[in-house]
Image (cartoon, coloured by chain):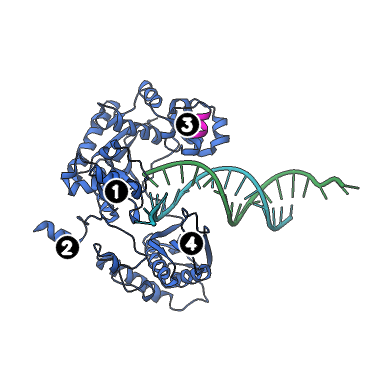
Chain colours: A blue, B cyan, C green
Amino acid sequence: METTRFALVDCNSFYVSCERVFRPELNGRPVVVLSNNDGCVIARSNEAKALDIKMGTPYFQMKELAKQERVEVFSSNYELYGDMSRRVANTLAQFTPNLEIYSIDECFMDLSHLKPEEVAEYGKQIKKTVERWTGIPVSVGVACTKTLAKVANRLAKKRVGADGVLVLESKQETEEALRQTEVGDVWGIGRQHARRLQQLDVHTAWDLQKLPEGWVKKHMAVTGLRTLLELRGKPCQELEIEAPARKNICTSRSFGRPLTQLTDIEEALSTHTVRCATKLRKQGSCASSLTVFLMTNRFAVTEHNFCNSRTKQLASPTSNELELLRHAISLLRVMFRAGKRYVKVGIILNDLVPASEVQLDLFSHQNDEKQTKLMHTLDTLRQRFGHHSLKYAVQGAIDESNRHKEEQQKAPWMLRKDHISSCYTTAVEELLVIRK
DNA sequence: TCTGGGGTCCTAGGACCC
DNA sequence: TCTGGGGTCCTAGGACCC
């Protein structure tokens, strides 16, 4: 029987690295990237980590420090990061087609076919090639299960002399790695389980791996048991080359500032709904129900906290955004209460089914086919001319297409993006600037 | 003034059925 | 007063991931 071998390739401080590719003078300097609405820190360069800036720190709490230490601050630019992510994945695909795109900055690769003595050199080649072709620095961890590959990857980043590549082949190498890994840093062990395990004197991945299966199953469910077995070297999770179809699709955003007017919230919700429906059709699915949720500020002590949601079951599954829009707006109107300051609205499309399997409702519109063609046309035009090229009146007159727009020219629900970089790789005008 | 967004899986417990 | 047993389905909530 062939033993399995997985590599985990993880981009170092991915969002920061994307910004640095086009601003190389920022290498060696502290850089952070903020979440949507410039809320919290979600990516940090090593120099920023050295300043003790923690993941998830609200930006307003570190503004002063950023100024003092000349930290370069970016709003998140997902168009850029998504494009860079595709470049990294395409590069990795040159090494093996057995590739799982696990997240925007991580890929698992199947390296079972290699001889043990070839693995380390192969890992170095992967790292070098990605950096040369995309400009993004990566770390590579290799082991016989996904969970152990994660462990290896963490240490590849941390260990001096590892140089960003670590292979766990022998029992001794694996044991040493597990002893050096805190239990809370194991993939699948979150805050709750980590705290509980610490209380039981289980501090490292090595301690965790020694626990009895029965206890782990009882207290950490089968997902915990899988983690345990994978730490022991028994693979429980395969490579997922084809991304499985999503079961829910959600689009939501905080507003640029708290809102009190229904019409403003309707503009935001209808824009989210169109986005969400576009994602739905891209996956080739129809939604059987939709949920709209509306939130007041969960941090405000003075306001009566309010998070409400309403769900609508549809007569038959649909991907028609006109229909989804109608239902979303009517759910919002039922929920809305005057006099509250709202901070966020969102839509979730649930119980998705493949469009090809949707039962035709004999009593519904005769013009279903016409509607399908209309949606297809909308998708094509938006893809070609940008998402803002075709809108409904309810979405409001102002759009986000000019990303550097002054605050007062934006609709009140639109995100703050005070530190946005250019879409170097995808925006036509940017490409022209680069060519000049 | 200022605290992200988008997912998955699992389990317990209630409702309901025979 | 006593008040079976086993199965399924659904949902809310918890925990986790990046």
State which region is magenta.
A195-199
Looking at the picture, do discs 4 and 3 lie on one chain? yes
Given the image, on which type of amino acid does mark 3 rest? Answer: Leu
Q: What chain is tagged by disc 2?
A: A
Which numbered circle lies on residue A293? 4
Q: How many marks?
A: 4
- Co-location on one chain, circles 3 and 1: yes
Please state which of the two labelled residues, at mark 4 or mark 2, is closer to the viewer: 4
Q: Which residue is mark 3?
A: A229
Q: Position of residue A375 (x, y in %)?
A: 36, 71
Q: Nearer the viewer, mark 3 or mark 2?
A: 2
Q: Earlier in the sequence, mark 3 or mark 2?
A: 3
Quadrant in which the C terminus of chain A appears: bottom left
Please name the residue shown 48% across and 70% down the image. Answer: A327
Foreground of the two, A40 or A312: A40
Label 3, label 2: how far apart the Cα atoms are? 52 Å
Chain of the residue displaying label 3: A
Residue kind at label 4, given as amino acid type: Phe
The mark closer to the camera, 4 or 3, is 4
State the image quarter where residue A105 is shown. top left
**Label 4: chain?**
A
Q: Secondary structure at mark 1?
A: strand
- On screen, residue A246 versus residue A383, left or right, reads right
Q: Residue at x 27, y 45 (%)?
A: A66
Of residues A60 and A268, the one drawn nearer to the viewer in this rendering: A60
